[in-house]
Image (cartoon, grey):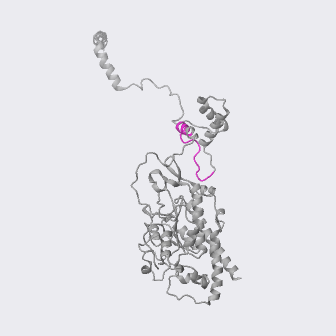
Amino acid sequence: MAAGVLTRVRQALRGPRLAAALFSCHGQTLSSAAAAVHSPAAATIETDATDKILNFPLTQPDYFHLSELFSMKDLFDARVHLGHKKGCRHALMEPYLFGCRLDMDIIDLEQTVDHLQRALNFTAHVAFRGGVVLFVSRRRQFAHLVETTARDCGEYAHTRYWKGGLLTNAPIQYNPGVRLPDLIVFLSTLNNVFREHVGIRDAAKMNIPTVGIVDSNCNPSLISYPVPGNDDTPAAMELYCRLFKMTIKRAKDKRRQMELLKGI
Amino acid sequence: MAGSRLEKFGTVFTRVRDLLRAGVLKPDEKPIWYDVYAAFPPKKEPLYQKPRRPRVPAADPVPQLFYKEDEIRAKFFEVYGNGPKAFELLMPNFISSCQKFVMKYSELESRGDIKPELLFEETAKALLSEGIYLRKRGGPVVAPESRDPLLSMKLTDMLAEQQKDKETNIPEKQPEAETLNPDSQTS
């Protein structure tokens, strides 16, 4: 089990990637390492530049051009609109449903497109700022897919049994200076017994925003950026994994590009 | 690092915002996602919603999806069963025999020269001319071969008939026996 679980990131892993000056601007630097000491003048110039890098993308509605990554037709072909049967329906999912065809819930793809766009945009901006993304899915069918997706975009995944204090008791279960993820992406919000995944409640407790694919039998209430869609079909899961991987890669490449430009 | 673990009150954003405002969280401890959330908030605030007992509403909030062609489809499946061609679900633009029937039916209906009662039969004939043979459910209607009427007689009926004959034919039987006797005596 230890071999299969990719969990916490050590700050040292992230350190060399970012310039030392950026550390002081970014939050979440829980560590015992002493902060770097620079001359004040150089620090202000650098902080201005980094402020521009960080703040300018927030003014654009679609800075990473994520709307070109998918269309409603792609969602339809991947069977994202297929929900569960009427008896399995969660009451809070009713606003997101288009209708019910012979007792089978159909998810409204117009809403899904909008929600997915917002979720991908949020993920991209968080990755752009060097945030840690954790992919969670308790579906055994897609565990390998989720893990390879996370590895390919340089982020983290947790597709095994979620131990109780993983987020809430992290300093004791891991080492005291552990850094928690800045965003958790749930590719399936249910656990193996069709109850809500504990990670949703824990992330809300630890003030970590969540992005989640909610099917018609899921509870979308505590998820910051829910995406109503099918989480059972392999085609749909492959589509989501591909989209998240592409957004995170785009965001990180853009960041590297900006850093190089700043260096020039 | 300070935090607020009350997931049932407010959203993640409101709690962090209030912690920053109160000074519990220093400005350099601001989370990475805070500015992003402020710039691009979600469509609906992710507040905790208490699990309410499921009440059966008078009207189902999710509409049932039915189309005008469903009537044609229902009649098709009733008469012809599943149809000759199996459904190929992996092809996105697959047209089943039922769908062809529906398309032909709508075409003939829009033409308007056929009476509505005969439309169903006319569509079947039109598809037959195109090469799609639709077989009615319940097997083909075949005239039963002429069976020996003796085979369809039941033993119970025969016995009942014999009983009835005994009661009515007793006076008739005796003269028959008398005529038979001289024959038996000769042997």
Task: Give the left or right position of residue A111, taking residue B11 as reference.
Answer: right
Spot occupied by residue B2 in the image (x, y as percentages of width and height):
46, 78
Along the viewing direction, whichever of B156 and B117 lies nearer the viewer? B117
Along the viewing direction, whichever of B83 and A25 lies nearer the viewer? A25
Image quadrant containing the C terminus of chain B: top left
Residue with the most extreme right position:
A264
Q: Main secondary structure of the magenta part?
A: loop
> Where B183 falls versus A127 (above or below)?
above
Spot occupied by residue B65 in the image (x, y as percentages of width and height):
54, 45
Along the viewing direction, whichever of A215 and A255 lies nearer the viewer? A255
- Residue at 44% x, 73% y: name it: B4
> Where A181 falls versus A68 (above or below)?
below
Residue with the most extreme front position:
B22
- Residue at 66% x, 84% y: name it: A45
| Magenta span contains residue B15 | no
> Where B130 falls versus B87 (above or below)?
above
Spot occupied by residue A110 in the image (x, y as percentages of width and height):
59, 55
Q: Is residue A33 visible?
A: yes
Q: Is residue A241 visible?
A: no
- Residue at 49% x, 87% y: name it: A32
Determine the image quadrant of residue A82: bottom right
| Magenta span contains residue B80 | yes
Task: Give the left or right position of residue A35, taking residue B161 as reference.
Answer: right
Q: How many marks?
A: 0
> Where A198 falls versus B63 (above or below)?
below
Spot occupied by residue A49 in the image (x, y as percentages of width and height):
66, 80
Q: Which residues are magenta?
A: B73-92
